[in-house]
Image (cartoon, rainbow, N blue to C red):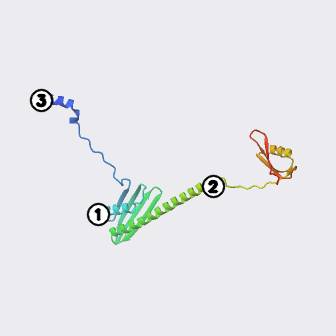
Amino acid sequence: MAFEARLAKAARSNPRSSSAPKKPRTQPQKGDSMQVMVTFRHVDPTEGLRQHAEAKVQHAVRFLRRAIEAHVILSVEKQRHIAEVQVSGSHLNLTAAEETTDLYSAIDLATSKLERQVKKQMAKYKDRKTNNHAVVAKNTDGAKRAGAVIHTQRIAVKPMSLDEAILQLKMIQNDFLVFKNAATEMLSVVYRRKDGNFGLIEPEPS
């Protein structure tokens, strides 16, 4: 009894000694987002065919960065060995199928066709990205040229006195008025000042 009491006391003083060892955390494996499902129709499923199909599909879609799913359908109809691969994802649906006298070669040919489709899709994506960059660069270049003349307006210049020009300017919404000064017979500009008064611009006599 004394020995058991000592053991119980030791366990209470050091609780870690009686705790179960912690299990190591499992790290997510690269490619977990890629799911390949293999379906066998009219043919006995074998692990060799399954692994071959999975490896070929993963290699064919290696350029795709989006999380995708792939479905491989292997079927045999008399002498026809057919491999069909369907790949789906975000804004992506690809299908490739081939028929031979051997399922392994049918998988190889179908996944090769799938890889060509993937490369074609990637090329289109790069072209769209390049075009978008070109449009942005063009718009930026246009912004740099701000201040250029973008609008031309022709106006009728009427002869009038300065007082008449000021009266006319008061009746319109513009900040200035171009007129032919009746006193000098020269083009002049009368404009509103920030202090509420009016200014006059006229050319120097030649």
Q: Quadrant of residue 172?
A: top right
Front residue (pair 185, 206): 206
Q: Image quadrant for the N terminus?
A: top left
Whole-percent x, y for residue 80 in the image: 36, 71
Q: Amino acid at mark 1?
A: Gly
Q: Is residue 118 left or right of residue 28?
A: right
97 relative to 135 in the view: left or right:
left
* Precedes in sequence: disc 1 or disc 2: 1
Select label 1 or label 2 by which is in front: 2
Q: Secondary structure at mark 1?
A: helix
Tell me the SS state at disc 2: loop
Q: Earlier in the sequence, mark 3 or mark 1?
A: 3
The numbered mark at residue 159 is: none
Q: Amino acid at mark 2?
A: Arg
Q: Earlier in the sequence, mark 2 or mark 3?
A: 3
Disc 1: which residue? 48
Q: Residues within 10 Å of mark 2 (few under 14, many from 20)?
A: few
Q: CA distance from mark 3 to mark 1?
A: 61 Å
Give the mark toward the camera: 2 or 3: 2
Residue 1 visible (yes or no): no
